[in-house]
Image: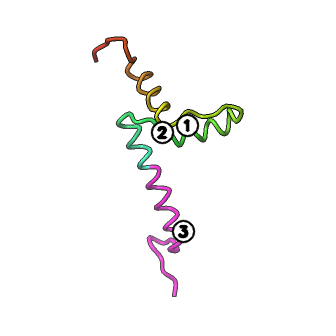
Amino acid sequence: MRVTLGGLDLPEAGRYLARSTRALGQSLRLMVGLPDYDTYLSHMAATHPDRAPMSYEAFFRERLEARYGAGKGRCC
């Protein structure tokens, strides 16, 4: 007996849902302005293998400073 979900075999459906969930999570983080550390790590490994990536805390701090201009006293 073959179990299907929406026309996909169960293992295929599981992989599809996992990809969709990751993509949705990434989209929601981008919509509210949260940087994606996993994407940054992938980029660093692919394009800058000789450089050590920032820690999550340093990455997040750098993204906040880039977005809001830390210390510039700007409003809105």
Q: Are marks 1 and 2 in contact (CB under 8 Å)?
A: yes
Give the image location of residue 48, x and y in percent: 68, 32
The residue indicated by pointer 3 is 12
Tell me where the magenta segment starts and ends, as one range. Answer: 1-23
Q: Nearer the viewer, residue 57 or 66?
A: 57
The residue indicated by pointer 2 is 36
Question: Secondary structure beneath disc 1?
Answer: helix
Q: Are marks 3 and 1 in contact (CB under 8 Å)?
A: no
Amino acid found under the numbered disc labelled 2: Asp
Given this view, does label 3 or label 1 mark the residue nearer the observer? 1
The residue indicated by pointer 1 is 40
Residue at point 28%, 15% (across, down): 75
Who comes first in sequence, dot 2 or dot 3?
A: 3
Q: Residues within 10 Å of mark 3 (few under 14, many from 20)?
A: few
Farthest right residue in view: 50
Residue at point 40%, 17% (across, down): 69
Q: Nearer the viewer, residue 49 or 52?
A: 52
Location of residue 14 with respect to 28 vertically, above or below: below
Give the position of the C terminus as an image quadrant.
top left
